[in-house]
């Protein structure tokens, strides 16, 4: 059979890719983007992690003397950048001592820990592999992207890990742009017409974050006027949407059932 060659296109008989790239991801994808930047920019870190999971030699090609692209910019949109929760960061849980605040903190802590139980395979226990940027020893991050943009919602349960990632990169001397927007996790993924039911305006987060990302990725070359985006026109074409009145009640039933089933599967997997 044909031998696989990284970065090579057999059908066009030529190389693939670019010598400069931008990496962008949201939620778990934000973790992938930031970790990919760390691995591309730090050969020793890449070697350590690959060798930690390379018992079968499946990932030997990642250790070859191949050229990786230069990571120019990284964007993480409410990324899962660490294990920090209100229950694990000193002083955070005490900021809201109401019973509702306590329940919220417990739910966030349980959810984040459950996610990482799925991230961290049992075979890797004790290896300190590092699944996220803030899991890594800062000494291993010698180089990174030229610029990083971290965006997050003010009420996002992942906000603590985003703040920690920002702190980690800035202490290493890397350029970081950090922006907060009204809303919770995945505010960029909700339909614009739903925002009014979620107590915020989509123009204040989803649209504003989109503008910011475009301007960041183009080095300031992109402008709203240049692309003919008229906020007044968009608002005029935004019609009243009552579908959330049907969808949201279904979520009240679906979410508990799906969480319960997920916990059951996770429990079975770890037995």
Image (cartoon, rainbow, N blue to C red):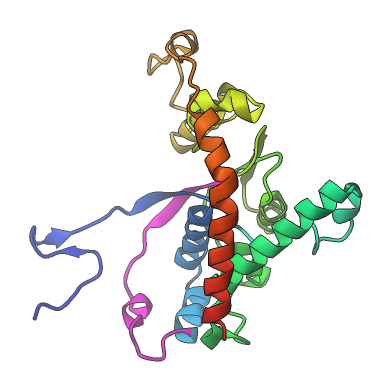
Q: Nearer the viewer, residue 8 or 116?
A: 116
Q: Nearer the viewer, residue 192 or 148?
A: 192
Image point (63%, 30%), residue name: 198
Whether residue 236 sits left or right of residue 270 in the image: it is left
Image point (58%, 77%), residue name: 267
- Quadrant of the image for the C terminus? bottom right
Residue lying at the far bottom of the rendered structure:
55
**How many numbered tags mark residues here?**
0
- Quadrant of the image for the N terminus? bottom left
Residue 74, percent across and down?
50, 49
Whether residue 228 sits left or right of residue 246 in the image: it is left
Image point (56%, 22%), residue name: 203
Residue 187 in sight from this viewpoint: no
Q: Nearer the viewer, residue 200 or 229?
A: 200
The quadrant where residue 266 appears: bottom right
**Vertical placement of residue 206 versus 140, above or below:** above
Whether residue 219 sits left or right of residue 62 in the image: it is right
Is 75 in the magenta?
yes
Residue 2, percent across and down?
10, 77
Is 34 in the magenta?
no
Residue 114 in sight from this viewpoint: yes
Q: Which residues are magenta?
A: 53-77
**Vertical placement of residue 125 versus 41, above or below:** below
């Amino acid at each position: 059979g044909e031998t696989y060659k990284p970065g090579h296109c057999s059908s066009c008989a030529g190389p693939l890719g670019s010598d400069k790239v931008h990496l962008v991801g949201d939620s778990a994808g934000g973790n992938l983007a930031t970790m990919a930047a760390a691995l591309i920019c730090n050969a020793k870190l890449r070697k350590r992690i690959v060798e930690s999971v390379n018992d079968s030699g499946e990932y030997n090609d990642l250790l070859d003397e191949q050229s990786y692209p230069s990571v120019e910019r990284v964007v993480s949109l409410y990324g899962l950048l660490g294990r920090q929760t209100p229950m694990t960061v000193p002083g955070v849980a005490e900021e809201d001592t109401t019973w509702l605040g306590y329940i919220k903190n417990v739910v966030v802590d349980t959810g984040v820990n459950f996610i990482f139980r799925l991230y961290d395979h049992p075979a890797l226990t004790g290896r300190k592999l590092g699944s996220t940027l803030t899991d890594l020893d800062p000494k291993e991050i010698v180089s990174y992207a030229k610029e990083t943009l971290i965006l997050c919602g003010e009420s996002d349960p992942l906000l603590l890990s985003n703040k920690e990632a920002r702190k980690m990169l800035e202490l290493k001397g890397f350029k970081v742009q950090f922006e907060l927007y009204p809303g919770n996790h995945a505010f960029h993924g909700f339909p614009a017409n739903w925002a009014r039911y979620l107590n915020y305006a989509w123009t204040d987060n989803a649209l504003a974050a989109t503008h910011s990302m475009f301007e960041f990725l183009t080095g300031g070359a992109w402008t709203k006027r240049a692309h003919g985006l008229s906020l007044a026109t968009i608002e005029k074409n935004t019609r009243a949407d009552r579908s959330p009145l049907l969808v949201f009640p279904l979520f009240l039933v679906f979410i508990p059932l799906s969480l319960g089933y997920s916990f059951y599967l996770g429990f079975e997997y770890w037995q």
